[in-house]
Image (cartoon, grey):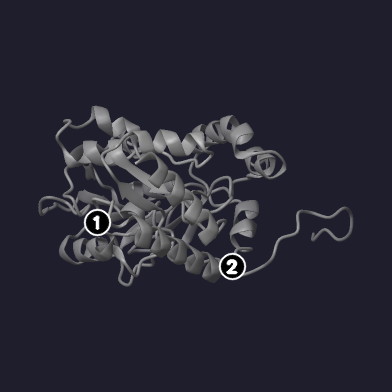
């Protein structure tokens, strides 16, 4: 029976979810598991430039892995001719590779598109792709999945997320720095979650976001950074315009930049440090891992914040 009365719950606004027509699961990695199980893939072609969490999930599922290289524009270096039990996994890097993903999807059957860095990309034709909303918004877990076939799948239990929110709440009351260890613990926990549907709490949070504003802010911040940093950036960002970016990838072969920004409370990650042991030092993947600084452009920040980031970068270089 519906509960009426009593104490108040956390109050959130109510908007449509951005991916309201997708399958809502409890993590991006479990979306990948759903695809592998449903499509019965035995072998996956995976880029060297990818995080270990995906590799670990495929290994856990007993899938054969074959790595491939990308070129300087983040596209696969070769064409693929796949059998029915093989798939190509491609990452929509930094939310800027929609056109590459679209081209690969049109040319290659059995593609799986990893949109964990491209929340706002929506497929325009049937394709298997998955998303990790906590990379873009303050949620403890969750994943969205589009698949080219939607028929029977085993019934799934609904997850619960209330005990995974401490780092999110503490960041508001205290700071990102003091919450970081709990954040890392939560990332480990999410990586081990059994395959379930998205929790009511995560769905409620994702239904409280003004996505139009988030898109506008990301693009505005990205454009400002590119206007100021394009002459210094080895990557040509003009090819990636008209996207909704995950971050601004600044590629300068100077390993002081990241350390200097972090020292000044600009928390920039490394995607993905484990790649350095997977490839040779002269590969594009090694250089991108070592030197690309993913500058934050998300909806929490404005152009004043972007100017501050640029000023710090110009100080160090």
Image disc number at residue 210: 2
Residue in view at x 35 percent, y 40 percent? 54
Classify mark 1: residues with Cα within 10 Å, few (<14), some (14-19) or many (20+). Answer: many
Observer-nearest of 47 and 82: 47
The x and y percentages for residue 297 are: 46, 56
Residue lying farthest front? 315
The crowd level at tag 2 (other Cα within 10 Å; few <14, some 14-19, many 20+) is some
| Nearer the observer, 74 or 80 | 74
Quarter of the image where the C terminus is located: top left
What quarter of the picture does the N terminus occupy?
bottom right
Snapshot quadrant of residue 169:
top right
Q: Which mark is residue 111?
A: 1
Eyeballing the image, is 52 above or below 89? above
Element marked by disc 2: loop
Q: Position of residue 251 (x, y in %)?
A: 29, 46
Say how many tags the image has: 2
Query: Considering only order in the chain, which callout, 1 or 2, is on the residue closer to the N terminus?
Result: 1
Q: Is residue 53 visible?
A: no
Q: Helix or strand or loop: what does disc 1 sit on?
A: strand
Tell me the distance, in whole angstroms, between the alpha carbons under discs 2 and 1.
31 Å
Residue at point 56%, 52% (across, down)? 198
Left/right placement of residue 284 relative to residue 311 reads: left
Left/right placement of residue 184 relative to residue 230 reads: right
């Amino acid at each position: 029976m519906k509960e009426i009365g009593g104490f108040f719950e956390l109050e959130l606004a109510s908007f449509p979810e951005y991916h309201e027509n997708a399958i809502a699961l409890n993590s991006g990695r479990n979306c990948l598991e759903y695809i592998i199980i449903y499509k019965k893939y035995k072998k996956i072609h995976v880029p060297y430039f990818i995080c270990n969490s995906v590799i670990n999930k495929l290994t856990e599922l007993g899938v054969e892995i074959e790595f491939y290289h990308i070129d300087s524009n983040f596209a696969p270096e070769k064409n693929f001719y796949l059998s029915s039990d093989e798939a190509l996994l491609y990452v929509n890097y930094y939310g800027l590779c929609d056109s590459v993903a679209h081209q690969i999807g049109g040319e290659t059957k059995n593609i799986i598109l990893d949109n964990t860095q491209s929340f706002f990309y929506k497929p325009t034709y049937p394709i298997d792709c998955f998303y990790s909303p906590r990379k873009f918004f303050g949620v403890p877990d969750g994943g969205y999945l589009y698949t080219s076939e939607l028929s029977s799948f085993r019934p799934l239990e609904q997850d619960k997320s209330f005990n995974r929110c401490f780092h999110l709440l503490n960041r508001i009351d205290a700071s990102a720095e003091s919450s970081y260890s709990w954040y890392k613990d939560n990332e480990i926990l999410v990586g081990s979650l059994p395959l379930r549907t998205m929790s009511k709490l995560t769905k409620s949070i994702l239904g409280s976001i003004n996505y139009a504003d988030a898109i506008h802010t990301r693009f505005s911040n990205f454009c400002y950074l590119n206007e100021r940093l394009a002459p210094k950036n080895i990557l040509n960002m003009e090819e990636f315009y008209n996207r909704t970016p995950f971050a601004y990838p600044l590629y300068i072969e100077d390993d002081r930049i990241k350390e200097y920004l972090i020292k000044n409370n600009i928390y920039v990650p490394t995607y993905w440090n484990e790649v350095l042991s997977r490839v040779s030092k002269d590969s594009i993947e090694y250089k991108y891992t070592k030197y690309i600084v993913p500058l934050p452009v998300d909806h929490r920040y404005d152009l004043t914040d972007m100017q501050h980031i640029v000023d710090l970068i110009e100080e160090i270089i």
